[in-house]
Image: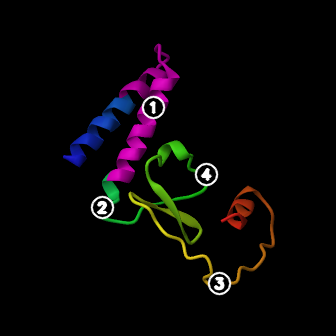
Amino acid sequence: MARAANLRRNRAFKKELHKFEHDLPYDPNVIQARFVQMIRGVHLRSLPSRPVYVTNEIEAEFTSGLQRCAGGVAFRLYSERCFIIRDSGVQIQAFERRGRLEDALKGL
């Protein structure tokens, strides 16, 4: 059932994307909405059977309704609340280089 729903979402996205790729009239909001639905479908289908991780660059609209909990250098998605242990005793060494991704990691 979940697989069939994912296939429907994928087809719906590809149908709208086809319009864009072939210079046909399209609505960018519809393409974006279908893309978000397709990605969320992958997340929701995978959560019961395996851990799902996203990084800082993944916008909140793709994970709305799910909880992001730090899991190393990425965030693990949960369908219910997660609890974070504040004092783990882990010492973090300063990064030697600077950049967008390095700065994002420092903020975790």
State the image quarter where residue 46 is shown: bottom left
Tell me the tag on residue 48. 2
Question: In the rendered structure, which disc, 4 or 2, sits on the residue that comes first in sequence?
Answer: 2
**Mark 4 and 2 residues: CB-CB less than 8 Å, in contact?**
no
State the image quarter where residue 85 is shown: bottom right
Question: In the rendered structure, which disc, 2 or 3, sits on the residue that comes first in sequence?
Answer: 2
In magenta, the rendered stretch is 15-44
Q: Which residue is identified by label 1?
A: 33
Q: Amino acid at mark 2?
A: Pro
Give the crowd class for mark 2: few <14, some 14-19, many >=20 residues within 10 Å: few
Q: Amino acid at mark 3?
A: Val
Prevailing SS of the magenta stretch: helix
Measured along the vertical axis of the image, is residue 82 above or below residue 65?
Answer: below
Q: CA distance from mark 4 to mark 3?
A: 24 Å
Q: Amino acid at mark 4?
A: Glu
Q: Which residue is identified by label 3?
A: 90
State the image quarter where residue 77 is shown: bottom left
